[in-house]
């Protein structure tokens, strides 16, 4: 009987620390292209490619994290989910690798209706796949085979660095990047996707404007973990624990 009560207590306490999950929609998304298209705006899809001058593309996504993190919690895991719309050349069987970067100095203001290769924040306009090393952080990379994923298949990027970045942006990680900045001021983070290999196919994924199927929209899926139980919950657990102790002593 005593073991059963302790088990129930433990399960109840663990439940207060259990991860909650939510999906955050992308608030803005666009890609930029070099060469003759360096001043052209693209909003109906997201493209990532490192295919030579005039065919290089980098994608930008803005995610509003205002009010998504519950009190007394932090983001435990985070995954960026994208759905493939096309890839070119379609006959290629080579893997594609994307690098994912975050902006960490609050110089991230942009609008998808005006974003171009020449004005995109942190874009190294002289590089087919590079971005400015100042004010950015590499969050990791994702490798996949477009032919294996195929059209309408999904790809997912997840890393501990992405979760750390989101917690920093929300003001929960202090001076995490040692640059004197402790949060993203407007809580609207920017992710930049670039293609690593010059021989892999250019990949197109659905943007929020490029599909009428919500499940194909770019999405950020996050889980939250409690580092400290809410005071009322903690008090309840302590009280229940005390009652168990008294009950056990009386049985003795």
Image: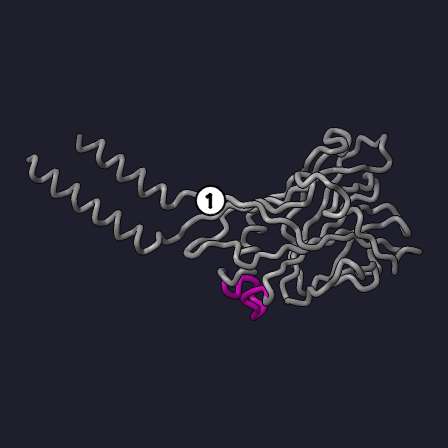
Magenta region? 173-184
- Asked if the magenta segment contains residue 24, the reply would be no
Where is residue 150 drawn, in percent x and y?
Answer: 76, 31
In the displayed structure, would residue 165 be above or below residue 185?
A: above
Residue at image point 82% right, 42% down: 202
Dot 1 falls on a residue whose secondary structure is strand
Where is residue 71 drawn, in percent x and y?
Answer: 43, 57
Q: Quadrant of residue 2?
A: top left
- Give whichever of 27, 145 is nearer the camera: 27
Task: Give the residue number, with chain letter if any, for mark 1.
Answer: 20
The rendered magenta stretch, by its main secondary structure, is classed as loop
Residue at image point 9% right, 40% down: 249
In the displayed structure, would residue 248 be above or below residue 108?
A: above
Q: Quadrant of residue 190?
A: bottom right
- Give whichever of 244, 139 is nearer the camera: 244
Q: Is residue 172 left or right of residue 195?
A: left
Locate the N terminus by quadrant. Answer: top left
Q: Is residue 192 left or right of residue 184?
A: right
Where is residue 18 drawn, in percent x and y?
Answer: 41, 43
Which residue in the rendered view is the most extreme toward the bottom? 180
Where is residue 210 drawn, in percent x and y?
Answer: 77, 44
């Amino acid at each position: 009987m005593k073991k059963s009560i302790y088990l129930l207590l433990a399960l109840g306490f663990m439940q207060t620390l259990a991860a909650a999950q939510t999906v955050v929609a992308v608030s803005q998304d666009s890609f930029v292209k070099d060469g003759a298209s360096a001043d052209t705006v693209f909003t109906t899809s997201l493209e990532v490619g490192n295919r030579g001058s005039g065919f290089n593309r980098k994608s930008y996504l803005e995610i509003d994290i205002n009010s998504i993190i519950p009190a007394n919690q932090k983001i435990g895991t985070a995954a960026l989910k994208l759905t493939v719309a096309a890839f070119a050349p379609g006959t290629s069987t080579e893997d594609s690798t994307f690098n994912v970067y975050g902006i960490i100095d609050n110089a991230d203001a942009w609008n998808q209706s005006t974003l171009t290769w020449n004005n995109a924040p942190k874009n190294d306009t002289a590089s087919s796949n590079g971005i400015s090393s100042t004010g950015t952080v590499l969050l990791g990379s994702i490798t996949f085979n477009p032919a294996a994923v195929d059209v309408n298949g999904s790809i997912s990027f997840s890393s501990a660095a992405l979760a750390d970045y989101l917690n920093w942006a929300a003001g929960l990680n202090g001076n995490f990047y040692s640059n004197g900045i402790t949060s993203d001021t407007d809580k609207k983070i920017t992710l930049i996707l670039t293609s690593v290999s010059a021989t892999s196919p250019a990949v197109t994924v659905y943007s929020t404007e490029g599909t009428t199927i919500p499940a194909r929209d770019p999405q950020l899926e996050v889980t939250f973990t409690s580092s400290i139980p809410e005071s009322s919950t903690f008090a309840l657990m302590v009280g229940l624990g005390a009652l168990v102790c008294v009950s056990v002593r009386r049985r003795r």
